[in-house]
Amino acid sequence: MTTLFTILFDGVAYGMLLFVLACGLAVTLGLMNFVNLAHGAFAMTGGYVCAVLVNQSGWPFFAALPLAFVASALIGAVLERALYRHLYARSHLDQVLFSVGLVFMSVAAVDYIMGSSRIFIKLPAALEGQLDFFGVGIGRYRLMIIVICGLLTLALQLILARTRFGSRLRAAVDDPRAASGLGINVPQVFALTFAFGCGLAGLGGALSAEILGLDPYFPLKFMIYFLIVVTVGGSSSITGPFLASLLLGIGDVAGKYYVPKMGPFVIYTLMIVLLIWRPNGLFGRTVAR
Amino acid sequence: MTAVSEVSSRAIARARWRPAEIAFWILVACCAFLFPSRYLIMTDIVRLALFALSLDLILGYAGIVSLGHAAFFGVGAYSAGLMALHGIITEPVIALVVAGLVAMVLGFLTSFLVIRGVDLTRLMVTLGIALLLEALAERFSNITGGSDGLQGIEMAPILGLFAFDMYGKTGFFYSLIVLFLLFLLARRIVHSPFGLSLRAIRNNPLRASAIGVPVDRRLIAVYTVAAFYAGIAGALFTQTTALASLDVFSFERSADLMLVLVIGGTGYLYGGLIGAVVFKMLQEVFSTITPQYWQFWIGLVLVVIVLVGRDRMHRWALWLPNLVIRQVAGRKAVVAVPKSDAP
């Protein structure tokens, strides 16, 4: 029974992490219908920024986290203005080629600068070890992830539902033409959202170094996970990708624990079956364009 | 009826062999004899060209974007390897066809998953299938040899006559002949009414089904054929290198393949062949500059190609040949990607 709880707990932490990593992609795919396979590269950037700050410059971990966000968001904003926006109207094939090219470049560049081995971020002592909660071992680090990611999710939901920017974004998602007709600056809304999504990915990358492992091949290894979150969750709301990440997280952890030999087999099979059954995602609302 | 006969006579005219095509193949044959010390890399190019030809069939002619075409390559490679290793079928040519058929069966089965849904779903499903097979190959490492790959493959002589030699001469001519035969077949396929209906589907599936083209069945058929081609390419890989490891399924292989096809241009069959030559040369140049980080430059090439625009790129590439032909023969060059056909 306690193992079950531990698996559930680890799975939730993992899933929340995936959500923070992937929710920027949900916007890119959902809002502009842009297939951005390079999303993981932004996450990796955040992770490495955090690692360099903590390990080499001696910054405290919690001060480096916001900087990971800012660094990725800045790079995202620059790339969006310089490159991405020229490709919104292009075919999916062009978008795939472009973002795969970016992934290859980022992998080789990080390999060149930081070396190809896995990087660890020095954690503060307060985050190491386990808490004992009614006999269930709870990792402190994972607890922190759940708290941070949970708060972020709440904040995102509030921003989307309550603020002016949120309603502009939702209007732009539903019908970009009508939205721009109403005087909403759709490209600007999208640029901001893109940068914010990249920032979240960077934060996720920094948080995930401990759990997922951070090496130059991060964008390739986890690309499929991000895509699963978005395609299974659908991109019409924030709840869909959130539930999909939780399912994926719990499923992956449980799969690795109970049938370790089957490896990622379970996840891929589930994804294919789900996509065949509901091509627009489990929680999809609109017909995918 | 006149409309029909006009369409068919135009299609027949397009299917005729052009001087440039004959020149291309003569050039290829010349290369085979001109560079006797470069057989290994030329074999590599021929294999890649065949693989790219396979992707061209589904991407250039049917408009299916696949991120996991390495799945069929890998299945072909492993089937050829396993057959040779366990002595099930030792004769390379028969083994090659059988390996292609195995990949074809897989292609047929998975085609039902692929034709459903929109571009994004297709991307995910093709990628998922390739990853799934990679995971399976890793899981059953007692059969596939895991990350070490199949080792100790010994190839019997082709047709019992031509033994594989150390310099790769036999392997090269064998691959080249296979490529040429399969190219002829592909050429026949795309210029047949079946191939024309594929173009109609790519340009507008709804309109195609309205004029009575069975869209799903045609897509299944072409996907299956493409899987056969990819399987043959994979089997050639195993037979000429005597090696099959997990990376035959890798994502990089599928992604590189797309680059090959994009360099050469989609939808006229020669794209994959030209792209394979250019890609291998680029790779060679990049890996002499920065041995470990050539992927960076490959990525840069991809980004630049997309940003410049594939159409424009091909127009630039064709500027010089066009100029020459216009001066000499007074008409435009023949090898060009029709504007409306670029997916």
Image (cartoon, rainbow, N blue to C red):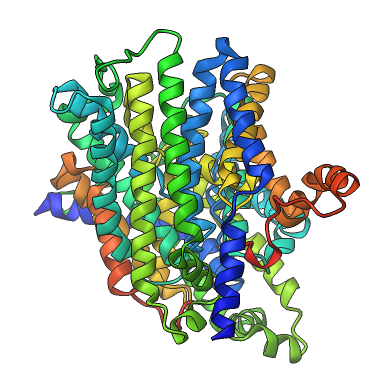
Q: How many marks?
A: 0
Is residue B103 visible to us here?
Answer: yes
**The one of A20 and B66 positioned closer to us in this rendering:** B66
Residue closer to the observer: A107 or A213: A107
Picture layout, residue B149 above or below residue B262: above
Work out whether B31 lies above or below A211.
Answer: above
Residue A140 visible, this orientation: no
**Residue at 88 percent of width and 46 percent of height:** B323
Residue B300 appears in which quarter of the rendering? Answer: top right
In the rendered view, does B202 fall on the left or right side of A140? right
Q: Is residue A261 left or right of residue B110?
A: left
Residue A26 spot, x, y in % from top left: 51, 66
Q: Position of residue B183 (x, y in %)?
A: 47, 43
Q: Going by the picture, which residue comes out furthest to the left?
A: A1
- Quadrant of residue A28 in the image? bottom right
Q: Position of residue B63 (x, y in %)?
A: 51, 63
At 46% from the left edge and 21% from the top edge, which residue is drawn? B172
**Which corner quadrant holds the N terminus of chain A?**
bottom left
A230 lies above or below B273: below
In front here: A143 or A173? A173
Q: Is residue B196 above or below residue A255?
A: below
* Residue A190 in the image, given as x and y percentages of width and height: 68, 70
Left/right of residue A184 with respect to residue B184 in the rendered view: right
Q: Residue at 26% x, 64% y: name it.
A: A273
